[in-house]
Image (spheres, rainbow, N blue to C red):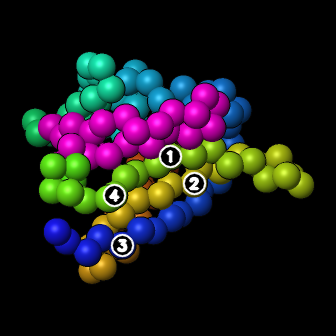
Amino acid sequence: MSDKIKFQIEIEVKSSTKVLYNMISTPSGLSEWFADDVNIKDDVYTFFWDGSSEEARLITKRKGEAIKFQWIEDFEEGEKTFFEMAIKIDELTNDVAMMITDFAEEDEIEESKLLWTNQVNVLKKVIGS
């Protein structure tokens, strides 16, 4: 078992929470910015990128708020890891942001944060943010 470390990043996204939630919680939404294609069967999502695929189990889904997955490979290795995409609304300004929680090896955290930032930037372009 590896020693993956939990990290979080918050990125402002100018969008309605309804549009943003649709983009993070549906196969069609996820395939527009997170992966090339996404299939779902029961609670297992299959993400496709450049000819390869990864499967993740849906752990929790809070309507309009957040979605949390665990990679099947991590589950099979006994990892207590997950990745979550949550919608955060600033109480004072009503600004909308995505709060990403994920795990990575210590020497891969900065690279993982950069990857998430790039993916969310794609999402922002797709929704016109």
Coordinates of residue 122 in the picture (x, y in percent): 45, 44
Q: Which mark's residue is nearer the viewer, 3 or 2?
A: 3
Gap in angstroms between the C-alphas marked 1 and 2:
6 Å
Q: Nearer the viewer, residue 125 or 123?
A: 123
Find numbered disc 2 in the image and state the secondary structure of the residue it sits on.
Answer: strand
- Residue 9, relative to residue 47: is it above or below? below
Q: Name the residue that disc number 2 marks.
A: 99
Q: Quadrant of the C terminus?
A: top right
Disc 3 marks which amino acid?
A: Ile
Disc 1 marks which amino acid?
A: Met
Q: Name the residue that disc number 4 marks.
A: 81
Q: How many marks?
A: 4
- Is residue 61 in the magenta section? yes
Evaluate if marks 1 and 3 touch, with contact meaning CB atoms under 8 Å apart.
no
Residue 5 has which mark? 3
- Mark 2 crowd level (few <14, some 14–19, many ≥20, 10 Å Cα): some
Evaluate if marks 1 and 4 touch, with contact meaning CB atoms under 8 Å apart.
no
- Mark 1 crowd level (few <14, some 14–19, many ≥20, 10 Å Cα): many
Q: Name the residue that disc number 1 marks.
A: 85
Q: Earlier in the sequence, mark 1 or mark 3?
A: 3
Q: Earlier in the sequence, mark 3 or mark 2?
A: 3
